[in-house]
Image (tube, coloured by chain):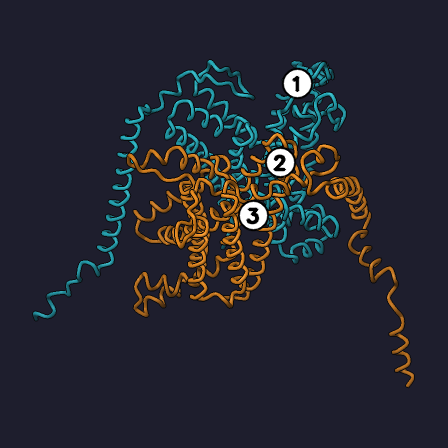
Chain colours: A orange, B cyan
Amino acid sequence: MKSTTAASHRDEIKPPVTEIGVIGWIRANLFNGWFNSLLTLAVLYLLWLIVPGTVKWAFIDSVWLTGSEECRATDGACWSVISANIRFILFGFYPHDLQWRPLLAMGLLVALLFYSRERSRWNKTLAWAWLAGLFAMGLLLKGGLFGLTAVESANWGGLPLTLLLSVFGLTAAYPVGVVLALGRQTNMPVIKSFCVVYIELIRGVPLISLLFMSSVVFPLFLPEGVTVNKILRAQVAIILFTAAYIAEVVRGGLQGIDRGQYEAAESLGLNYFQTMRLIILPQALKIVIPPSVSILISAFKDTSLVVIIALYDLLKTTQTTLSDPKWMGYSAEAYIFVALIYFICCFAMSNYSRKLEKELDTGR
Amino acid sequence: MQATTAPEKIPFLRDPTKRSILYQLVTMAGVALLGYYLINNTLINLERQSISTGFEFIEKEAAFEIGESLIDYSAADSYGKALLVGFLNTLIVSFIGIILTVVLGTILGIARLSTNWLLSKLAAAYIEVFQDIPVLLQLFFWYAFFYEILPGPRQALDLLPGVFLCNRGMIFGVPHYHPAFGYAAAAFVLSCIAVWFLRRWAIKRQDATGRTFPLFRASLLILIGLPAIVWWFGGAPTEMNVPVLSGFNFKGGITISPEFTALLLGLVLYTAAFVAEVVRAGIQSVGKGQREAATSLGLRPGRVMHLIILPQALRVIVPPLTSQMLNLTKNSSLAVAIGYPDFVSVAGTTINQTGQAIEGVALIMIVYLIFSLSTSAFMNWYNKKIKLVER
């Protein structure tokens, strides 16, 4: 009896209040030692300098849904520059009454992405659904079939163009990259050296030089009378560029495959293509899913470079809006808005990549 | 008898060696045909548009001005010299950018691993945000920051005494020219050589006798002391060339253009986020047991970092770090979008004026290939040097 009371008495003794709860957490994480305490105070001071002013500028003094005259009158942020021009920023010169089409295409893309996020849903049907979806997106943008009015590609712009360049770019670049990676791994010296030279050449130069090439040199390569529109040329440059990076990632995956797998496939009597298609690539591509997502992220960010060859992507439409005398001088607000769009997309993708990495980490 | 003499004849297509030769021949023929087709088209097109070929234009007068230049340049100089100016501009922005990036990235990477919750979360937020925004957008933002948000010279922000920030760029004072500075610079080079020999001697002595030498403190003393003494004997000039507001602009001091500053700021802030991740991964790659073992041997925390953690972490850090440096150099080509005259921008102007697009783009590619090939040569050398010696 006595021992139980002692035990219950011991239970009642709580740890000191400075070691648990909020205070304990603060002591352990912010003020452990003089150096950390000093750091915390310095950071807090810095935040105090920056945050209140920013909040006041962005939220309290700001105007949201007004004309440009009200903007001139306030000290705060002029978010009206976005709300007043949102359709141009997002869709560029796409005909005004047809803008539901790119919107629908983007919705389709988001829906497909959202549905494909679970790995258990990855199967052949989904692959076909993606193909059909990509086709439908292209059709929605271009029109000309099923009673949809055709829209010249010169009028495509804004966010749909950015997404188009990156999604189609990666989709088309992936097979090319896989072929290049396989070429680099073969023991045929001619094919191997072609692949190595291509990959190293492309990875050694900045994307902008390829875009220059697509806009000024590529037309010279074509026979007389044949022209290729500007968007397609930029798209080809992005595909060629991305393929080299994908090739290196896939090569990493191929190198991660045990030699025994090749030998087992050979002893089963499979030829080279069967070995690759049935044994090696399924394993190698699984390993490289997370780095492939990082390539998608950088391809998505890199599409912004088409501004330099004057394609109307999201960044260019924003700049065009800012060159309107009515809205001149609100670059910070407009760029922050565009940065937010990019950030949300990239953050979602990189989070997803981290999640996949964790899932795939449990072994092959 | 008959059955043993005739070995089975393998059909041509089933023989792996012959088949591989066939594949390679087909590939070669395909590439050659494609190359011939493209070159042929190009020649016809060039002829039709009467564009000249070859690199003769390099000798011709450029006839365009360049905003900022490290060497003397005027519109009367040749295209070759204009391209050299652009090349030097690319080099200087990359060089300064790389130094600042490594410093900032290391600080951020260590901050990310700090036990201080606030600091670690702030560093994490910084890394995530700056990695996920295209570098071009960041460049545009900083460029607009200079031209729209910063005030004119009259209301310039006085960051530190003598350092002004306004829409004309960053302006700060420099010492007046005096021969003593030249001597001090020479003394600095000398002391670097001296430190190198001292280090060799110290390592040799430690290997032979086990006695350590306070190398860091001695080097610091030599590196700072020797130039300082020379500067003192040279007359100890302290006169400064400080910027003074006169009329609508500053006079004196050194002005760094908004384009250069915006480019540098954008590149450094963007790349530093990636470098921070590299540094964090490198430090985390060193096993916890290493630190514990070193501490239990009685090493002080500074020496644990210097002797145990860093040598192992650097092996992981350096390869991706060099590729980030190369990325920064390649991204400096985006200067063309905000009007800083780097190599790509000058080459672009050259293309526009001469119409010789192929040569211009080829020059751009060659310059960047040289950068990347020399980087990978360095990487191979480094990897060989630090490779674990296995038994």
Q: Quadrant of residue B276?
A: top right
Is A198 or A257 nearer to us in this picture? A198
Q: Is residue A165 visible?
A: yes
Crowding at mark 1 (Cα within 10 Å: few <14, some 14-19, many 20+): many
In the rendered image of this protein, does residue B241 appear above or below residue A137?
A: above
- If you read the primary sequence from the N terminus, does the residue marked by circle 3 or circle 2 appear first? 2
- Do the residues under discs 3 and 2 have CB atoms within 8 angstroms? no
Crowding at mark 2 (Cα within 10 Å: few <14, some 14-19, many 20+): many
Q: Which mark is residue B181?
A: 1
- If you read the primary sequence from the N terminus, does the residue marked by circle 3 or circle 1 appear first? 1
Is B317 or B220 nearer to us in this picture? B317
| Residue B227 % position (x, y) | 68, 23
| Residue B200 % position (x, y) | 59, 36
- If you read the primary sequence from the N terminus, does the residue marked by circle 2 or circle 1 appear first? 2
Q: What is the C-alpha distance between the residues marked 3 and 1?
A: 38 Å
**Tag 3: amino acid:** Arg
Residue receiving disc 3: B315
